[in-house]
Amino acid sequence: MLRACVVAAAIVVPAIAHAQDAFEIQVYDAQTAARGEPGLELHLNQHVNEGAVNETHLTFEPHYGLAAWAELGGYFQTAVTTTGDLAYAGVKLRLKLRRPQRAWDDRIGLAINGEISAVPSRFEPQVWGGEIRPIIDLTAGRLYASFNPILAVELRGDVAGHPQLEPAAKITMKLTEAMAIGAEAYGAFGPLDDLGSEHASRLLGVLDVSGDWWDLNIGGGYG
């Protein structure tokens, strides 16, 4: 069965932080699609600057379960500019692998996601890049938490080959079996060999709603 997910976010920004992904604003969980199961995620976000919509991003992310512990995914990114023009904004390919069995009585999940991207220079000056995203998540009763200590890698430019630390975290509390509220935080701290040379952050309040074959994640925040 095809599983669909919509991830929508509105962010008030003092300025665009190029160190952070402006198209996919999401903290990953440690799950993968079942073997042979297709899925589609739709990422829709707006960046608001000084009270006006700066840019709207729409990303399509199909994925497919290669095995019970492996998932292949891709991204097709678009942007609607302030003039109303629709622009191509790049493609990405990712592979997500997880530990087949969760740990600590099924509470903790472990996974890793690898990604390579080609994005037009108007959106990403270096064009070619990628990331390695370790994932650890925890489910304890109504509480859910996930931490992604992301290492972003530029393949061109001054910091090419110098992994940059861009951690992301999420915590939610279930209100019902189908609904949870919480917060997400995103940061960027520069290359590992020069930590602190850059600092950017985002903080969002989030609402997650799930159905039999669909999920809806809504967020709003600043950064």
Image: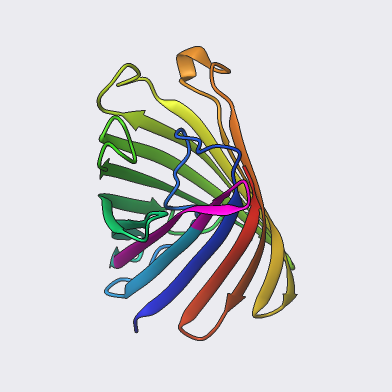
Locate residue 77, reporting x and y percent. Answer: 31, 56
Examine the rendering and report whether any part of residue 52 can be seen.
Answer: yes
Residue shown at 46% from the left, 42% from the top: 134
Q: Quadrant of the N terminus?
A: bottom left
* Quarter location, residue 88: bottom left
> Which residue of the protein is positioned furthest toward the top in this rendering?
194
Residue nearer the viewer, 202 or 142: 202
Residue shown at 58% from the left, 58% from the top: 10
Dominant secondary-structure state across the stretch colored magenta: strand
- When the figure is inspected, residue 207 is found, relative to residue 56, above or below; the finding is below
Residue 4 in the figure: left or right of residue 156: right
Residue shown at 35% from the left, 19% from the top: 159
* Quarter location, residue 41: bottom left
Residue shown at 55% from the left, 37% from the top: 15
The residue range painted magenta reads: 46-64
* Quarter location, residue 171: bottom right
Residue nearer the viewer, 126 or 178: 126
Q: Is residue 63 magenta?
A: yes
Q: Quadrant of the C terminus?
A: top right
Q: What colouring does the structure picture have? A: rainbow
Locate residue 192, reporting x and y percent. Answer: 48, 19
Locate residue 172, reporting x and y percent. Answer: 70, 61
Residue 11 in the figure: left or right of residue 84: right
Examine the rendering and report whether any part of residue 29 can be seen.
Answer: no
> Which residue of the protein is positioned furthest toward the front in this rendering?
83
Q: Is residue 122 magenta?
A: no
Locate residue 209, reporting x and y percent. Answer: 61, 76
Residue nearer the viewer, 9 or 193: 9
Q: How many marks?
A: 0
- When the figure is inspected, residue 54 is found, relative to residue 32, above or below; the finding is above
